[in-house]
Image (cartoon, rainbow, N blue to C red):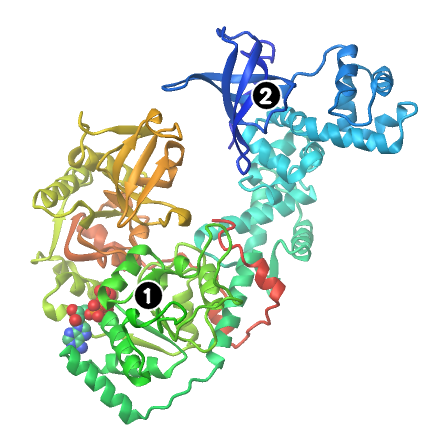
Amino acid sequence: MEENTLFSESTEEERPYIIGELNRMIFHKESEHFSIASINVTDTNEDFSEKSLVIKGYFPPLEEGESYVFHGEFQEHKKFGRQYQVDFYKRVMPETKDGLIVYLASDLFHGIGQKTAERIVDELGEQAISMILQNPDVLDRVPKLAKEKKKQLHEALKEHQGFEHVMIHLNQYGFGLKMSQKIYEAFKDQTLSIIEEDPYQLVFEVEGFGFHRADEIAKMQELPDDHPTRVRAACLYIMQQSLSSGHVYLPTELCLSQVENLLNNGNMNAVTFEQLSDQIIHLAENRYVFIEEDHVYLPSLFHAENGLCHQLERITEESLDIEHTQADLMKIIGDVEEKEAMSYGEDQFQAIEKALHSKAMILTGGPGTGKTTVIKGIIQSYSKLNDVSIDPGDYGSGDPFPFILTAPTGRAAKRMTESTGLPARTIHRLLGWDGHNSFEKNQDNQLEGNVLIIDEFSMVDIWLANQLFRAIPSGMQVLIVGDEDQLPSVGPGQVLADLLRSEYIPSIQLTEVYRQKEGSKIIQLAHEIKNDQCTSKSLEKDHDFNFIPAGEHQIKELVTNIVKKAIDKGIELREVQVLAPMYRSETGIHKLNEEIQQVVNPKSKQKRDLTFKEVTYRKGDKVIQLVNQPEDGVYNGDIGEIAAIFRAEENVDQVEQVVVEYDSKEVVYPKKDLNNIMHAYCTSIHKSQGSEFSIVILPIVRGYRRMLRKNLIYTAITRSKQSLIICGDQQAFLEGIQTRDTNLRYTGLAEKLQENRIPAVEEEEEEEGLSPYDFM
Ligand SMILES: Nc1ncnc2c1ncn2[C@@H]1O[C@H](COP(=O)(O)OP(=O)(O)OP(=O)(O)O)[C@@H](O)[C@H]1O
């Protein structure tokens, strides 16, 4: 929430101020309304005697010749000296009638001369400007003022004064400049009347404005608890909240009862059930939600779910031209086996055969069951059957490579490239995501190629699945690969599980474990967990596995020692990964990161560091990217290392910076963007999805109990390639793997596909669904 800065404790007069006129604008960023300007100081009560000053903050470009009063605080900039960080400003208005007449007769207001200005001030007095801004009809009282001139004057005043006038009021509600800008952008000159009459509209129109904040303002205005927009805003809020639990819709009854609880908090009869139903219908009529049978959807999810059904139908409807005989196929697979010096297992053979004969197929299986082996087999067999080259070098720029390999994360795409020797990209990059809500590849500009292979599909949410499938041309063959026992996607939906359950497209499940034959205890343990066969005997030490019993108080030290030992043995820091299920606790991710950093990358005179929000980042630190940042080519979950830290005076942008080196690129983070990364000595199990590490260290303690689930632990242990060290409480581990994920997700995909209830999708609706990350 925006901080309150003004009027709370001191009056405007008592506050330190700087009054000045624009000297020159140094910088203005339109999208953020952020400005830096040099001003000539005409008056101040601050201890400042120089004539000019650089000011910065969230204000629009200042106008020449106008005088402004600024409140804020001085900051010392190493190179540029003292600067003023503005947190409130307003134009200095003429205080006398004469001054006001000069102002209104100035060039700022076309068509208003000296005489007219005098008449306005005579009639309306010293408060003329705020009176006109609040209600332009007051100008009717001014004699001999043409209708057109009234309109022009009001427009010009709004333009010059509008934001400042509104901002002063918004500040009284505790909004800082930045939030005020956002609110003003949304409502312009209607802002104040909306805030006063119906603050709940802000929940609908201003990004980041929550229901509870609107409720606080409404209380100040003494709006009734059953105000219709309040009910609607609460409903939207509940729907948006449901996204964090992965739901695609909420059953109407559940939605209504949650809204009722929210609205009637402490006042049991504030809103009746009838009022609730009326408002939800109103929301549906205005397309803020969609109601389908007894399910309530947010628009983007409604369109994504229906869109995906529609795309699947379109893709599977097209028949495949198969020109080869069964004998051709047998021979070709046999040739591939010979080349690879191996023989496919029965289910693997069947998977290759079925994939080659299907428009779309799902391949599932736990670790080491040969999913990658089958993918390679499919690519090679397809290439031989259709006489197409697997060498990307054989294809020119206008000649698309027939195989498109993709995965939801950068690490998973990289692994795909390593295991197949073919180029693979993240789904976002494949679709040309612009970082906001548009994809270069879509139904009008589809992907080019013959076969699309998507790995780690369990991580794909309903939004992304819809975007991806829109871009698949009807003639393309699609292979979906994933492990259904992994955690579901972070975003809403459970697309892989729903597709499997619906049986809408064929699937093959690989069950035989091949890597186990090479003696991997990790893989054996994964399958025992998967098949509910894991006992305390399964946790006995082996060459690649160890369960070290430890009490909760010993965990930090134990985990840190193991990491240190691994690094001392020469294992790269990025190949040693501690995974934990929760952030905040004595043994949570934050505390573990702090502890490990102190040992692995301690404070040193030779290493620069920088503290941001109580976390110290140091050169050499392992960090993880927390959001998608396509403009810099880094995505949520990418892991890198701090390569350099720059002081403000050392770079042209004049801000402190952290440079992080990712696999093949460097990304520069100005200090204010450090929210986008965090330390990654220990990361969450959710964030590790799609990645693998040589050594995984997994603390399991009683304190994690409410998080411990079979699919979470399974996901964690299947991240390790060479060694898995679990430390903590065996009993908590065994109980965890017996606990099912009870977080049921409300999704309609499986039923719609199963019952062949594929809704017709209008073009316009598809467009509306285009904002996949609206609520993320
Ligand atoms: N039919 C087979 N005969 C012999 N070895 C096999 C066979 N299938 C797979 N393997 C071997 O088993 C190991 C695991 O196979 P693969 O990497 O394809 O499995 P995966 O399901 O992709 O595993 P993960 O999900 O862990 O990456 C590999 O070393 C592979 O060479």
Q: Is residue 549 left or right of residue 221?
A: left
- Report x, y in % for residue 57: 51, 26
Q: Is residue 137 left or right of residue 88?
A: right
Say which residue label 2 marks. 89
Q: Is residue 222 left or right of residue 243?
A: right
- Residue 765 visible in the snapshot: yes
Question: Could you say which is closer to the camera, residue 51 or residue 353?
Answer: 51
Label 2 element class: strand
Q: Look at the picture and state if 321 lies above or below 80.
A: below
- Report x, y in % for residue 524: 16, 65
Say which residue label 1 marks. 455
Q: Residues within 10 Å of mark 1 (few under 14, many from 20)?
A: many
Q: Amino acid at mark 2?
A: Tyr
- Circles 1 and 2: CB atoms closer than 8 Å: no
Q: Residues within 10 Å of mark 2 (few under 14, many from 20)?
A: many
The disc at residue 214 is none
Q: Look at the picture and state if 341 lies above or below 45.
A: below
The quarter of the rendering in which ligand 1 is drawn is: bottom left
Q: CA distance from mark 1 to mark 2?
A: 53 Å
- Report x, y in % for residue 52: 52, 13
Label 1 element class: loop
- Residue 710 visible in the snapshot: no
Question: Could you say which is closer to the camera, residue 173 or residue 267?
Answer: 173
- Report x, y in % for residue 701: 23, 45
**Image quarter for residue 497?**
bottom left
For the residue with label 2, is its CB less than 8 Å from the closest atom of ligand 1?
no
Q: Is residue 207 left or right of residue 514?
A: right
Which residue occupies 30% across, 30% down? 646
Q: Look at the picture and state if 507 lies above or below 55.
A: below
Query: Which mark is first along the chain, 2 or 1?
Result: 2
Which residue occupies 16% across, 77% down? 340
Closer to viewer: mark 1 or mark 2: 2
